[in-house]
Amino acid sequence: MLSYRHGFHAGNHADVLKHAVAVFLARYMQGKPGGVLLLDTHAGAGLYNLRDTMAAKTGEWEDGVARVLDFAASSTQAATGTDGVPDLLRDWLALVRAHNPGGSLSVYPGSAALFAALRRPQDRVALYELHPTDHAALTAQMRRERRVFVEKADGFAALDAMLPPPERRALVLIDPSYEVKTDYETVVTTLAGAWRKFPTGVYALWLPVIERARTDAVLAAIVAAGLREVFCLELCMVPDGAARGLTGSQIIVVNPPWTMPGIAARALPRIAAILGAQGPVAADWLVAE
């Protein structure tokens, strides 16, 4: 079943958290000169037109990326050129602006577009997408990009074949739609298997908060799998039980940078305020070293 289209949700509150963290991790890893493999198991369509029918139907981006951009513009101090944007968002926001050079927000770069924009000459990008329409759009966008590989394949299965990478350094983003309920179990087995095969990789798993019991079960399974150095960031728009559907999300990071706990702890309350979030917000270790 491949009915999910991220175009309906591009740039929403979950994307703000997921993509800001992914860019933060990539930039940190690029602090060293060696090459990095940037791999996305569920890459989507790459770029999303926020003026098309899918985005217009839900308007979710208006309560996500648009709020961050508005905040950054309104909080800029004319005398210094600085703003109050949290450090966790800064590099991601710069990439969003680069994709909208006219200043008006019309395009949102998904994880695939962000990874392609971040790639240095020594890095590689591997993108997997099964949906035929999104795969075709992604392939067209990346056809002129060097060392960016797009494949119509199951990202869960493809990940195992890619590890360990010849670069010996990798950032893996695992972010399925969870339209198939077994994805909640598959993400744990995939993450645990990848970590055992390549324990020094950096892994970022996106997890929706829809039913708290299901979310907690995934976290418990990660702990039970024996992974070490696992950090969890959570941002929810409304309290548990106050709404149906996606109320928030988590990003579980394996092998986070040493700077992440402090930066995330300072940033998440501020991001929640920018987005008007009223639900749980947290940044803490799920499993310490």
Image (cartoon, rainbow, N blue to C red):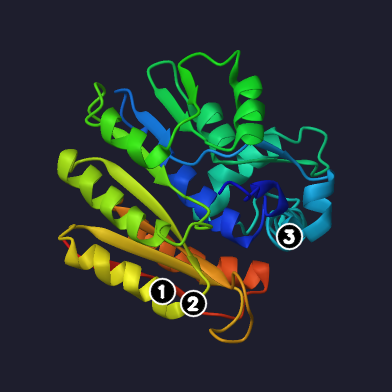
The mark closer to the camera, 1 or 3, is: 1
**Contact between labelled residues 2 and 1, with CB atoms less than 8 Å apart:** yes
Q: Which amino acid does label 2 sit on?
A: Glu
Q: In this view, does 161 lie to the left or right of 205?
A: left
Q: Is mark 3 on a helix, strand or loop?
A: helix
Distance of label 3 from label 2 (alpha carbons):
20 Å
**How many neighbours does mark 1 have within 10 angstroms: few (below 14), some (14-19), or many (20 or more)?**
few
Give how far across and how far down residue 108 sits, in percent: 69, 42
The mark closer to the camera, 3 or 2, is: 2
Q: Name the residue under label 1.
A: 214
| Circle on res. 60 | 3
**Marked residue nearer the N-terminal end (1 or 3):** 3
Q: Is mark 2 on a helix, strand or loop?
A: loop
Q: What residue type is labelled 1?
A: Arg
Q: Mark 2 points at which residue?
A: 211
Foreground of the two, 246 or 153: 153
Distance of label 1 from label 3 (alpha carbons):
24 Å
**How many neighbours does mark 3 have within 10 angstroms: few (below 14), some (14-19), or many (20 or more)?**
many
Foreground of the two, 18 or 83: 18
Residue positioned 25% across, 67% down in the render: 221
Q: Which amino acid does label 3 sit on?
A: Glu
Residue positioned 45% across, 21% down in the render: 120
Q: In this view, does 55 lie to the left or right of 157?
A: right
Foreground of the two, 160 or 278: 160
Give how far across and how far down residue 277 sits, in percent: 62, 75
Q: How many labels does the image show?
A: 3
Q: Is residue 43 above or below residue 68?
A: above
